Image: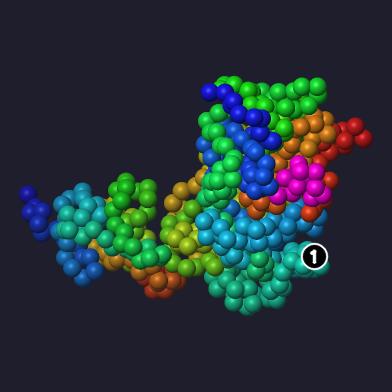
Amino acid sequence: MTFRGPAPDAVIVGAGMLGAAVAYFAAAAGMSVIVVERGSIASGTTSRCEGNLLLSDKEVGPELELAHYSQYVWRGELAEHADLWEFEAKGGLVAAASEAQRAGLDALAEHQRSLGIRAEPVEGPAALREIEPAIAPHLLGGVYYPEDAQVQPVLAAHHLLRLARERGAEVRTHLPVTGIRIVGGRAVGVNTPDGAIDAGAVVVCAGPWSGDVARLAGVDLPIRPRRGFVLVTEPIPVTIRHKVYSAEYVENVASSDSGLQVSPVVEGTPSGTVLIGSSRERVGFDAGFSAEAVGRIASAAARLFPVLADVQVMRTYSGFRPYSPDHLPVIGEDARMPGLWHAAGHEGAGIGLSVGTGRLLVQAMRHATPDVSLLPFRPHRFADADAA
Amino acid sequence: MIDDSTRQLCFDGRNVPFRPGQSVGAALAAAGISSWRTTRVGAAPRGLFCGIGVCYDCLVTVDGRRSQRACMTPAHEGQVVASDDPRRALDEPGGPNA
């Protein structure tokens, strides 16, 4: 079946969290959109992550600004739907194991506070245990972030797409994009096995596969997969109350190392299972199991919470974060190919950043000045750097 | 030949017979006991679900060791099996770190 109606304002490639967010805000703004997804809704990175909405792990800069803005969207415009996607303001606790780490956390927290983010110093091991009674005694203190939150990302993507459909959007799954249609140096639609879909704009929301989609338009987008594992424990009594991680997580998020990096991130869930991350490694799209990664995550988590040493891991899963060389997403129109837009490359923060990204991208598509400058996220910046 | 009916484990103070090779979960089910744990949210009853060690729904305390999968634990003579209390902290007596 070929699309036969009038050409929509935009065709969105990918029905993960980013595609869903862009579709929602576009439809809410009165734009006509078609979402094309080669698999099913939320079948990629969106269903293989933890659904973090974190401010705590963001260095001062454009990503923190986007995270702050996204929090405002999650808790403002989208607040009425919070229960649909299990929005939980569980709060984040970052713990330091050394004085050097503690000084680093304090400095970061001070910057974050200057931007209006709540970052409360936790002075000493006793104060740390007041927040998390089971945390390891060797930890010296840290910073508590009451605004850190979580959603169930698969529910969030499905519901945003449902809300978009109620506003006229069309979602077509199991339909791969096989080409990007270019007329006069401008992207004007996509080709699919069911025929061509012409549109006012093409928006690439394909997560770690976005580089492959952009290449169909002859554009180089250096988004690469970065694999991560998550461990799920047996259900246990309430033991861990917040999202808790060690200071080295902030360092690993910001690192560009392609080798295996592990830093513990531990959180309880309402059902009693404990989710434990995190690992980062650049191994292409190798979806195999890594005993080394899983073993090191488990050991690191047991150092953070010694009580976990005797808790059984029920299963593990892994996913591919869309890694960008400068750790910033690509958001906006591609100057090398007018009509081609991107919303991808948020690495491990895509769920949290999705709604801010979608809202800002749609503002830009409608020629409004975005609430937050998209300049640091311009998709062609890597080419600028090559040319420089 | 040993009379199978003489083999018994103890579940929450009640004698439950088992046959050689049976799992704790199978013995409980054969005795008409279908639930020995409740969920944290809503206190819904849980017992055997997958029966093959994957779902961790049938967790039970066996001889003082918490969170054992009833479907994967062979039944033994004199074994003491106790239903799990989801409110008992991990470091309370009877927990794995006790």
B93 in magenta: no
Q: Is residue A196 left or right of residue B79?
A: right
Residue type for callout 1: Leu
Circle 1 sits on which residue? A115
- The quadrant where residue A283 appears: top right
Q: Is residue A251 left or right of residue A265?
A: right
Q: Residue A84 location in percent, x, y? A: 52, 56
A362 in magenta: yes
The residue nearer to you, when weighing A212 against A169, is: A169
Residue at 80% x, 44% y is: A367
Magenta stretch in the rendered image: A359-370
Q: Residue A381 location in percent, x, y? A: 84, 38
The residue nearer to you, when weighing A180 against B75, is: A180
Residue at 73% x, 57% y is: A69
Neighbourhood count class around disc 1 (C-alpha, 10 Å): few under 14, some 14–19, many 20 upward: few
User: From the image, which quarter does the C terminus of chain A lie in?
Assistant: top right
Relative height, residue B35 to residue A220 (above, below):
below
Residue at 70% x, 50% y is: A359
Residue at 72% x, 73% y is: A121
